């Protein structure tokens, strides 16, 4: 454990203007407040905040960060309060301590939502001051170093899994490579100790068998650079057990097949020397194809810069080499901490630089603001942190970094949410491509927009960025709610008119408590979703109205009901996006021109069936869920799916002739399934994009005229 004067001397060595008195008082205050508390190891509890402070001195953080580290557990674990800390150490320290305290203990809970809720606090605290995250990461690192003292195996694994899922990726995203590697390896030793022990044993065996191979490679690389006049120093290491394990899993290979387990680093004077050193290596040693990456000209999101290459190097060893300048090396080692700069005036600190590497924090905050539930937020944040990056350019040359596998829709939302919502297509490198195309490094992307465009629900199935998923879900939820609201109000209005009453929002507002709703709009949305019936709303407003029909409750088929009422009472549903508030049943594939009926389905809105659909028999006992529907003319311009059952002769060219006839009649085959095959005939189901029933009838007539077609029927189901 660091002694008081040792800690102060460490801070003063790199920050002469640090508040020495504040550091001394914080050390003593933490020791006093934690008193006789003990850790699982049996050590005094105050040893933990002191060790956390010591870890942060390795990053050369300012005195305020070190004081925060000393005090970070006071509010949570002692009788000390934020007011006490503000009085003793000032408002800035109190704010930082409060940020760390708000994170709580991010232990994995049986309720995953609790973990996600805490993670929200983490990101919010980070956004206010990145030092809060640095203190939290140092706190987690020390806890992981002492994890073996925790007696409960379940608790150890829970903390290790959380470290692997959240803290190690966070450390990577802000460039703290040392923290990330140690956190991963400590978690790995707990989560899969047998695998780690096996890898360590094999590494020891290779080291003993080959002698000091690493030093021999370092010596030869140093000699090669010196001979070409490139100044620099070379270091080398065996990759961490977890890094080796991850490569084995990713490449699906055994340890013996994994050749590049040694990594070497060359640090040179400037960027020009980086490329000179690369030229020296590539001219002397065979290059491993596909292993060269230039993060100097295109840095990672966390500002990491290096040249990476794979070689069959000295001693015929397959090695990985990283080439960087001293400034790049500091950023690679210390990440965001390397950006801290201090003014010479005592206590007068500049704010940390916030460049492109922190844009992801703001993207997460946008998701946080609009996520519908905690798990959705956690899903996106973990996704964002783990994916590799792909770099694309706007037509003006601006660089946009996206996760690998991103599509033009992800790119559009990365530019701006409104651009994403209005995207109708895109040009990649000057050519129009489908919106689900995966973008590649260096692509120039131009987004084509239209004011009439709306996001498609299908987009969520292929976008990969959290921002795009959140924006699409947000738009669909809003649209869906409006549609459920309009539909629900019409259903309630019809129920009121059938009993001779006029519907008013004021009447519904008087029974909100009875209906367990917060607003009149919520009532209508609930009816539209099928969570509450229009009849229940009517009876709540007018308790005197009884369900008289239930006494002699005979269900009248809706077709007869229409004739009895003498007309078509279709509910007009305008502006609907397919797949949202209205669904077309797959059992009967209703088409414009069919007589149709709607069934209110919980959580989906209205499912449209043809009037003769056999599925409707299962709803005969719930007439209140039936909605009388009709087609509007505007529907005739939209493509619909019609399904045909065909029996086709098994002879050469029959399928080609079949598709030709369908195409000539303006049909488009979207799916084809052969249900039975015999020596003479095929039986198949074909889905067609067509306009209406008349269009489908024309296609069927044309098919029946073909010699190779034995029969054509409209399929049900």
Image (cartoon, helix red, strand yellow):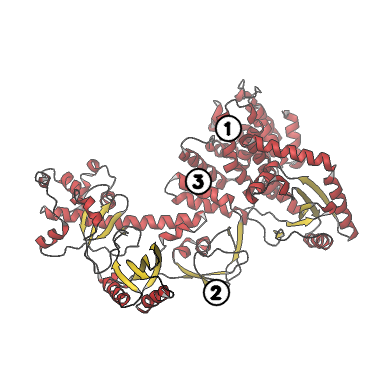
Residue 629 percent across, percent down from the top left: 22, 62
Q: Which of 345 and 107 is in front in this view?
A: 107
Q: How far apart are marks 3 and 1 (CA)?
A: 32 Å
Tell me which label, 3 or 1, sits earlier in the chain. 1
Q: Is residue 623 above or below residue 438?
A: above
Residue at the extreme front of the image, as rendered: 679
Under circle 2, the secondary element is: strand
Identify the disc placed on residue 378: 3
Tell me which label, 3 or 2, sits earlier in the chain. 3
Q: In this view, does 334 lie to the left or right of 646?
A: right
Residue at the extreme right of the image, as rendered: 227
Identify the disc placed on residue 656: none
Q: In this view, does 671 lie to the left or right of 286?
A: left
Crowding near the residue tagged with mark 1, few <14, some 14–19, many ≥20 C-alpha atoms within 10 Å = many
Label 3 with label 1: CB-CB less than 8 Å = no
* Residue denoted by label 1: 85
Residue depicted at x 12% and y 49%: 554
Residue depicted at x 61% and y 57%: 389
Tell me which label, 2 or 1, sits earlier in the chain. 1
Q: Which of 498 and 641 is in front in this view?
A: 641
* Residue denoted by label 2: 431
Q: Nearer the viewer, residue 662 or 400?
A: 662
Q: Nearer the viewer, residue 705 or 623?
A: 705
Residue depicted at x 14% and y 61%: 562
Q: Distance between the residues labelled 2 and 1?
A: 61 Å
Under circle 1, the secondary element is: helix
Label 2 with label 1: CB-CB less than 8 Å = no
Q: Nearer the viewer, mark 2 or mark 1?
A: 2
Q: Is residue 178 above or below residue 267?
A: above
Q: How far apart are marks 3 and 2 (CA)?
A: 36 Å
């Amino acid at each position: 454990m660091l002694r008081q004067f040792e800690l102060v001397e460490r801070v003063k060595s790199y920050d002469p203007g640090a508040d020495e008195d504040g550091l001394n008082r914080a050390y003593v205050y933490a020791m006093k407040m934690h008193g006789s508390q003990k850790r699982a190891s049996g050590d005094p509890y105050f040893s933990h905040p002191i060790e956390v402070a010591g870890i942060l001195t390795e990053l050369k953080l300012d005195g305020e960060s070190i004081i925060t580290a000393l005090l970070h557990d006071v509010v949570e674990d002692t009788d000390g309060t934020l007011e006490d800390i503000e009085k003793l150490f000032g408002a800035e320290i109190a704010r930082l301590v409060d940020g760390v305290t708000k994170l709580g203990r991010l232990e994995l809970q049986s309720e995953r939502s609790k973990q996600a809720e805490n993670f929200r606090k983490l990101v919010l605290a980070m956004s206010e001051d990145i030092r809060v995250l640095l203190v939290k990461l140092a706190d987690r690192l020390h806890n992981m170093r002492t994890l073996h003292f925790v007696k409960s195996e379940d608790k150890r694994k829970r903390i290790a899994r959380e470290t692997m899922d959240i803290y190690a990726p966070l450390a990577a995203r802000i460039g703290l490579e040392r923290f990330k590697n140690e956190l991963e390896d400590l978690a790995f030793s707990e989560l899969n100790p047998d695998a780690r022990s096996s890898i360590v044993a094999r590494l020891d065996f290779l080291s003993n068998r080959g002698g000091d191979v690493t030093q021999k490679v370092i010596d030869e690389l140093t000699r090669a650079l010196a001979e070409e006049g490139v100044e620099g120093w070379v270091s080398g290491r065996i990759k961490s057990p977890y890094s080796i394990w991850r490569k084995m899993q990713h490449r699906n290979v055994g340890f013996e097949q994994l050749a590049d387990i040694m990594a070497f680093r060359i640090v040179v004077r400037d960027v020009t020397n980086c490329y000179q050193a690369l030229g020296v290596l590539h001219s002397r040693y065979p290059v491993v194809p596909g292993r060269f990456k230039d993060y100097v000209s295109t840095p990672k999101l966390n500002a990491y810069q290096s040249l990476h290459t794979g070689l069959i190097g000295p001693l015929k060893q397959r090695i990985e080499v990283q080439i960087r300048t001293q400034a790049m090396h500091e950023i690679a080692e210390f990440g965001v901490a390397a950006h801290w700069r201090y003014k010479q005036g005592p206590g007068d600190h500049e704010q940390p630089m916030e460049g492109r590497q922190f844009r992801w924090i703001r993207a997460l905050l946008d998701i946080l603001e609009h996520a519908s539930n905690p798990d959705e937020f956690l899903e996106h944040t973990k996704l964002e942190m783990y994916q590799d990056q792909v770099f694309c350019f706007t037509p003006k040359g601006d660089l946009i970094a996206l996760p690998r596998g991103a599509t033009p829709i992800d790119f559009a939302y990365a530019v701006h949410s409104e651009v994403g919502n209005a995207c109708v297509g895109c040009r990649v490198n000057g050519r129009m491509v489908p919106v689900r195309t995966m973008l590649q490094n260096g692509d120039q992307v131009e987004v084509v927009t239209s004011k009439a465009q709306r996001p498609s629900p299908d987009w969520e199935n292929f976008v990969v960025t959290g921002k795009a998923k959140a924006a699409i879900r947000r738009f669909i939820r809003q649209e869906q709610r409006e549609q459920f609201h309009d539909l629900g109000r019409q259903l309630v209005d019809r129920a009121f008119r059938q009993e001779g009453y006029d519907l008013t929002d004021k009447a519904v507002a008087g029974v909100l408590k009875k209906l367990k709703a917060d607003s009149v709009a919520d009532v209508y949305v609930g009816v539209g979703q099928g969570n509450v019936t229009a009849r229940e709303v009517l009876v709540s407003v007018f308790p005197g109205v009884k369900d008289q029909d239930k006494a002699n409750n005979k269900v009248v088929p809706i077709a007869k009901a229409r004739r009895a009422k003498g007309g078509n009472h279709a509910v007009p549903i305008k502006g609907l996006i397919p797949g949202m508030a209205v669904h077309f049943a797959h059992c009967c594939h209703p088409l414009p021109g069919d007589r149709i009926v709607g069934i209110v389905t919980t959580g989906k809105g209205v499912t449209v069936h043809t009037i003769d659909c056999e599925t409707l028999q299962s709803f005969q006992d719930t007439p209140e869920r039936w909605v009388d529907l009709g087609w509007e003319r505007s529907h005739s311009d939209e493509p619909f799916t019609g399904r045909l059952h065909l029996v086709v002769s098994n002879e050469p060219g029959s399928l080609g002739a079949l598709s030709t006839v369908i195409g000539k009649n303006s049909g488009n085959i979207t799916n084809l399934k052969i249900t039975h095959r015999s020596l003479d005939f095929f039986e198949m189901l074909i889905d067609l994009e067509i306009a209406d029933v008349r269009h489908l009838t024309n296609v069927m007539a044309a098919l029946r005229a073909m010699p190779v077609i034995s029969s054509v029927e409209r399929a049900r189901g």
